[in-house]
Amino acid sequence: MTVVPAQQTGGGGSSGLYDVLELVLDRGLVIDAFVRVSLVGIEILKIDVRVVVASVDTYLRFAEACNRLDLEAGPRKSPGLPDMVGELTESGARGKSKGALSGAAETISDAFKQARGEGEGEAESRPRPRKTTAARRKEEQE
Amino acid sequence: MSTYVYAITASSHPALPEGMGGVGEPPLPVRILKEGDLAAIVSDAPEGLRPKRRDLLAHQNVLAEAGAAGSLLPMRFGSVATDDASVTGVLAERVEHYKERLRALDGKVEYNVKATHVEEAVLHRVMAESPELRALAEANRKAGGGSYDDKIRLGEMVAAAVKAKEGEDAAEVQRALAPATDAVSVGPESTGWLVNVSFLVDRGSAEEFLAAVERARKSLAHLELRVNGPLPPYSFVEPGPAEPAGTTAGADAGAE
């Protein structure tokens, strides 16, 4: 099970770091009399995070996943039966090690790496259309 | 020279991080500007400041250091005043407001929780709940995976079911964790997570809150919960909808 340390101040693991920096950038006190630095580079990062559900890539991937899923799960059962819950919980725990839905975690870390790259160089480098992980995966399949 | 502002705090704060490294390369030293009962934690502002990782971290580290020792109002990253005098001017002008916020947030920290679905587990769950989806998946499998259109149809329905589940689970996470907290602030939505919510937690209740997180991890096993904290109260510096103005100051001081 992937557990992000609950006690964390000031950076550490990469996804935890991203999660905290999102707060540093988006929340906190804003005072009209002060100016704020341009966040151009960061807007890109946010757009990159928006990848999943409504796309053909996602549909195809889900369809494939459902195929594999039923084979692994064996004979299907009616929903709502008590033993179903047990099985779901079990497989849920197994699933934990496989990462989050739709490679979102992957994408976040990609986006973060990109932000870091741009950060060390020039934060406001041109927004360029980036392919999502799913899009790349699809291309590989074709 | 313009002035970078990290936070506003009380001038009586017991461990102001004077001299600590702040933003800039090399890091500019943190200074303290006092104005009556209030103090601003500042440094010189570097030329051409941008939201670089190093500077974001420096900002966060100064706040974490100062926040561990006493109540403060964290500024959003990148707040720059024309000079020191304009910072103390703002402190003087809004002294009562900031003092009230510092009192309201005294002894409290923010925990941010983000959740994502564990793909395999959530697919199990939506399939288990929908005979229609199972029938469709089975038909596809029998047809050797199904045609492109079949796959799209199944995938689209599964995606819709997962999307609906996101909404349910977001509410569920909030319901599971809110009781141990003083206030809740829902962060911006994104498909990078299905829940992005911050909780204001009394330091004395932190253990209780983290225990609730562990319970939620067990009962919502198809979710991955990422918890970050204790953090300075970024999401609670101004009274929001979840925390109407005037209800927090002192009111819950003895409640925990």
Image (cartoon, rainbow, N blue to C red):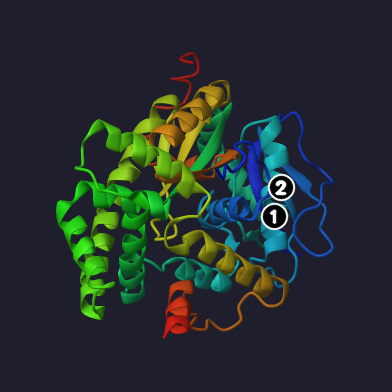
Question: Tag 2's secondary structure?
Answer: helix
Q: Is residue B237 visible?
A: no
Q: Are marks 2 and 1 in contact (CB under 8 Å)?
A: yes
Q: Give residue B167's position: percent from left, percent from top.
A: 29, 49
Q: Amino acid at mark 1?
A: Leu
Image coords of residue B184 (percent x, y): 41, 37
| Quarter location, residue B179 | top left
The disc label shown at residue B57, or none: 1
Kind of residue at badge 2: Asn
* Residue visible at 23% across and 44% down in the picture: A77
Chain letter of disc 1 in the image = B
Residue nearer the viewer, B5 or B35:
B5
Percent across and percent down for residue A27 are 51, 51
- In the figure, is residue B90 to the left or right of A135? right
Asked if one can make out residue B103 in the rendered structure from this viewpoint, the answer is yes
Say which residue label 2 marks. Answer: B61
Q: Residue furthest top?
A: B254
Q: Position of residue B113 (x, y in %)?
A: 48, 43
Describe the element under mark 1 as helix, strand or loop. helix
- Give the alpha-carbon distance from disc 2 to disc 1, as whole Å: 6 Å
Residue positioned 61% across, 69% down in the render: A115
Question: Are there few (<14), some (14-19), or many (20+) residues within 10 Å of tag 1?
Answer: many
- Please tell me which residue lies in front, A86 or B97: A86
Label 2 resides on the chain identified as B
Residue at the image point whose x is 46% and y is 15% from the top: B255
Does B114 sit above or below residue B189? above
Both labels 2 and 1 in a single chain: yes
**Quadrant where the C terminus of chain A is found in the figure:** bottom left
Quarter placement of the N terminus of chain A = top right
